[in-house]
Image (cartoon, grey):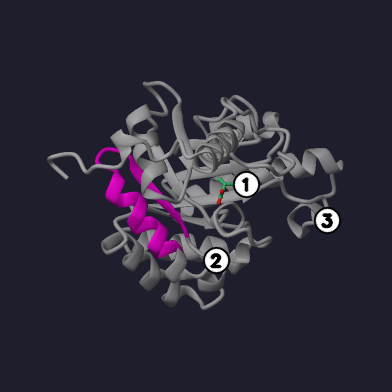
Amino acid sequence: MKAHTNKLCAVVTYSYTMAHLAEEAGVDMILVGDSATRVFSGLPDHRNMSLEQIFYHTQAVARACKRVKIMVDLPQATMEEGIEATVKASRWLIEEGKAHSIKVEGSSQLALDIVAAIAHADIPVVGHFTMLDIKDDRVHAKQQTNQEAVYQAMLALGKEFEIKGASTLLLSKIRPSIAAAITRSVDIPTIGIGSGPDCDGQILVLEDLLGLTYRNHPYYVKQYAQLGKLTSEAIRSFISEVHEGKYPDKSHSQPRQQE
Ligand code: KIV
């Protein structure tokens, strides 16, 4: 797809119903992301996601998908258990969860080593990183202007993920000119979120793009519908009809013959 076809379109989602709709609409990829802690469970910190929870969501999404490729987040807590645990967990998510690739988030040496180990186990792995801070050692060590140092360190990081065996890069909130340069400098596809138009693909949280979530959205979220408002209206109609004795009416009171 990087060289020959349309840009890759991916969404983040966590449930059978949403995954089914996303596949029907034609997305190429679904990420079962650790943002489930916020969007699905209402918890503030994605580090609260356990391996068992992400496995549960992965199976739910996989039940809905026949064509779409499923990528799944390796939880932070699993990464902290070490390389062997991450490879074992990745196998479980692929073989029993029915995901197709594992996403590893971070730019630390541990994240790079985990990518290498998962790739070595013949499991497709996605490297996910965000804009390096100018306080980062890799930026600081260079005797150049900060901006040039950030640019060089980000390019080197993208290349390093590729060398370690990543089959895709997910670039989140990276300055567009840098994301474009990373995309040109690697042979694997890049998928961007908040990283400008020049990545090989784009990803958004499905609930955000549908207008179902009420948080203060970051700059890159575009709402393609206002389903939150529609949902509230529908629920209000249900409540009114129950109060007024209009629901259930005759046609919703008898099972149909085939039921
Ligand atoms: O979990 C998630 O929603 C993500 C996105 C930032 C891509 O990792």
Q: Is residue 245 visible?
A: yes
The kind of residue on which mark 2 rests is Met
Q: Nearer the viewer, residue 35 or 159?
A: 35
Residue at numbered disc 3? 135
Circle 3 Cα neighbour tier, 10 Å, few/some/many (<14 / 14–19 / ≥20) = few
The front one of 233 and 202 is: 233
In this orientation, does residue 187 appear? no
For the N terminus, the image quarter is top left
Of label 2 and label 1, which has the lower sequence position? Answer: 2
Tell me which residue sits at (31%, 51%) in the image. Answer: 62
Which span is picked out in magenta?
A: 54-73
In magenta segment, residue 52: no
Q: Determine crowd level at label 2: few under 14, some 14-19, many 20+ residues with C-alpha closer than 10 A.
A: many
Q: Residue furthest left?
A: 258
On-image quarter of the C terminus: top left
* Residue under label 1: 156
**Residue 49 tag number:** 2
Ligand 1 neighbours mark 2 (CB distance < 8 Å): no
Instruction: Give the answer, above or below, for where 30 lies relative to 112.
Output: above
Quadrant of the rendered image containing residue 30? top left
Which residue type carries mark 1?
A: Ala
Mark nearest the camera among 3 and 2 is 2
